[in-house]
Amino acid sequence: MIKIKNSGPIDRILFYILVPAMFINLYLIFIWSPVERMMGEVQKIFYFHVGTAWVAFLAFFVVGVFSVLTLIKPKMERFIYAGISAEIGVLFTTLALTTGMVWGRASWNTWWTWEPRLITTLILWFIYVAYLFVRKMDGSWEKIAKLSSVFGIIGVINVPIVFMATRWWNTKLHPVVFGEGKDQTGGGMEPEMLATMFFSLFTITILYVFLLRKGAQIEKMREVIKKAKNNVINKIAS
Amino acid sequence: MTYLLMGYSAIFTLLAVYMVILGKRQKQIEKEIKQLEEWNSEI
């Protein structure tokens, strides 16, 4: 598991916010928020499903931003942040797809259906898995950074398509949460449900920021060590 | 209830797996730092 002992103050603050927030979030989900009348207990998957999907979008947006910056001027730090954010994005898309499948089995009686939101999400997942493979290619990092940035930008173009899929293709199968209902917010959800959902979004976003920082620190250290090792080898050789 | 358990088990298992992967990377870095220190002291 990740060690927090030697972390900087920002990571410590994030960690000490994250741990209680996660427990509060679980309390809100399982005890405080009401049970949905039609679906029953299984509806409670929704809070993490929406949260993980939101963080996946955020992570890919961050990949897009760092990819554009890398194309403008390749810098190792930008390349590292894009890579870690893509990794977390793939993880959270996997979580969103998995929880979505469980939800689908409970409510539609099928694990998978070829519905626009699901198809576009799966395409997004494949694009970023490909992106991660491109980053592992042999060659100079500048070349790989530029090539993978193109993948990163193509992927981020797919994000609004995934978000708008249920609205554009109007299948009525996948529920629309944002921009629905009388107040254009929560598709007729109870206020407690809405509050729990927003708290989940907050908690999972903090988790994303924490993982991004930790992951990037590890990768930056790896680069520093690589350079130091090369220096030592050169010294020995000379 | 079974589906709910299934969903949350999947979430926390995958999150734990990713944290273990990050932890392993961190350990590897620490090992390499130690190795570098040894090399430096030998030089």
Image: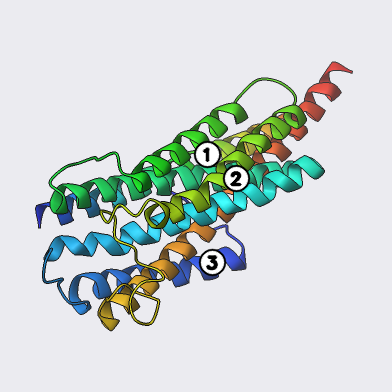
Amino acid at circle 1: Arg
Residue displayed at 65% across by 33% down: A148
Q: Are marks 2 and 1 on the same chain?
A: no
Give the x, y percent position of residue A112: 24, 40
| Contact, mark 3 vs mark 1 (Cβ under 8 Å) | no
Residue closer to the observer: A67 or A209? A67
- Above or below — where is A53 with respect to A177? above
Asked if the residues shown at circle 2 and circle 1 are in contact, with their CB atoms under 8 angstroms apart, the answer is: yes
Could you say whether the residue bearing mark 2 is in a helix, strand or loop?
helix
Amino acid type for the residue under numbered disc 2: Ile
Q: Is residue A211 visible?
A: no
- In-image side of A17 versus A97 (left or right): right
Q: Where is mark 3, residue-wise?
A: A12
Query: Which residue is depicted at the point 67% across and 38% down?
Result: A149
Q: Residue at x 76, y 33 (%)?
A: A227
Q: Which color scheme is applied?
A: rainbow
Using a 10 Å C-alpha cutoff, classify the residue at mark 2 as few (fewer than 14 neighbours), some (14 to 19) or many (20 or more).
Answer: many
Residue type (three-letter) at the residue carrying disc 3: Arg
Q: Provide the chain ID for the residue under circle 3.
A: A
Q: Which residue is mark 2?
A: A218
Question: How far apart, in angstroms, are the residues tagged by discs 2 and 3?
Answer: 16 Å
Asked whether the viewer can see residue A63, the reply is yes
State which quadrant residue A21 falls in.
bottom left
Label 1 neighbour load within 10 Å: few <14, some 14-19, many 20+: some
Residue A51: image quadrant is bottom left
Name the chain under label 1: B
Q: Position of residue A218 (x, y in %)?
A: 60, 45
